[in-house]
Image: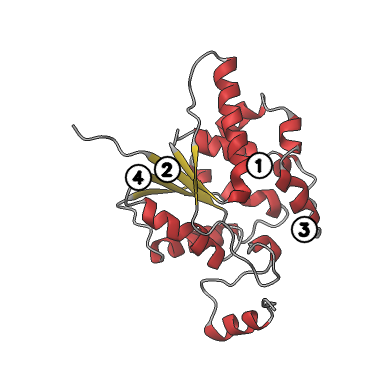
Amino acid sequence: MTTPRRRVLSGMQPSGLMHLGNYLGALENWKALQEQYECYFFVADWHALSTNYADTSRIRMFVRDMLVDWLAGGIDPERATIFIQSRIPEHAILHLLLSMMTPVSWLERNPTYKEKQEEIKEKDLTTYGFLGYPVLQAADILLYKPDFVPVGKDQLPHLELTRELARRFNDIYKTPVFPEPKEHLTKFPKVIGTDGRKMSKSYHNTINLSDTEPAVRQKLKTMVTDP
């Protein structure tokens, strides 16, 4: 009798062009995982709204480009299930149910909440969508009952919130509906951007996979090297 492969789930926001941080921190890891596990990889287009709600004009294009980059980067639809978050309405339904039982204090203690507000000052992030996006993230994960979630160290608080919500749901309804997923730490949990911070589309400090060689050289010239 064949033993079922353990399940892995991970997603990526289409809030801009894919960059080296995405490739080294996630895509390379995904390529290895798809050979060992039952993998679900999704484009988290609803999450992109948490910081880009005022201008959604390019999100659809970024979704398409991201899927192309995944396929070009080695994600195999024969080995992994690939999907777009917004095409599965159950994500929103479970998010709603979880939000009804999530204490606000659990969201406010999230260390990345105030950090990102401080670092992305040009955008108004005093919204429920930004405060509560870890609840949507928890819904994304728990819906598929994965054994593991690939994360960097900076995402561990979000995964712990997911586990807390699973425990709370199971306790309230006295039924073990949701198993608690474990972390699968990436080999490159943090890739430095051109300004010394974590490489992120939100910080405009990325080296994109689609950049030309002259563009890459110009960006590298702006980076501070170790003394």
Q: Earlier in the sequence, mark 4 or mark 2?
A: 2
**Figure check: 166 above or below 78:** above
Asked if disc 3 and disc 2 are in contact, CB closer than 8 Å, the reply is no
Does the CB distance between marks 1 and 4 fall below 8 Å? no
Identify whether 32 is placed above or below 199: above
Query: Based on the displayed image, in which of its 4 quarters is residue 30 positioned?
Result: bottom left
State how far apart marks 2 and 1 are (Cα): 20 Å
The alpha-carbon separation of the residues under discs 1 and 4 comes to 27 Å
Q: Which residue is drawn at 56% across and 27% down?
A: 166
For residue 185, side relative to residue 116 (left or right): left
Front one among 9 and 184: 184
Visible residue check, residue 132: yes
User: Could you tell me which secondary element the residue under label 3 belongs to?
Assistant: helix
Q: What x and y, as percent, mark residue 80?
A: 36, 49
The answer to which of marks 1 and 4 sits earlier in the sequence is 4
Q: Name the residue under label 1.
A: 133
The residue at 53%/39% (across/down) is 140
- Labels 4 and 2 touching (C-beta < 8 A): yes
Density class for disc 4 (Cα within 10 Å; few <14, some 14-19, many ≥20) is some
Residue position for label 3: 119
Q: Quadrant of residue 164?
A: top right
Which numbered tag is attached to residue 8?
A: 2
Res. 37 mark:
4
**Disc 1: CA contacts within 10 A as few (<14), some (14-19) or many (>=20):** many
Marks 3 and 4 sit apart, C-alpha to C-alpha, by: 36 Å
Q: Callout 4, which amino acid? A: Tyr
Q: Where is residue 163 in the image (x, y as percent from the top left)?
A: 57, 31
Q: Which residue is located at x 31 percent, y 39 percent?
A: 5
Residue shown at 56% from the left, 15% from the top? 173
Q: Nearer the viewer, mark 2 or mark 1?
A: 2
CA separation in Å, label 4 and label 2: 6 Å
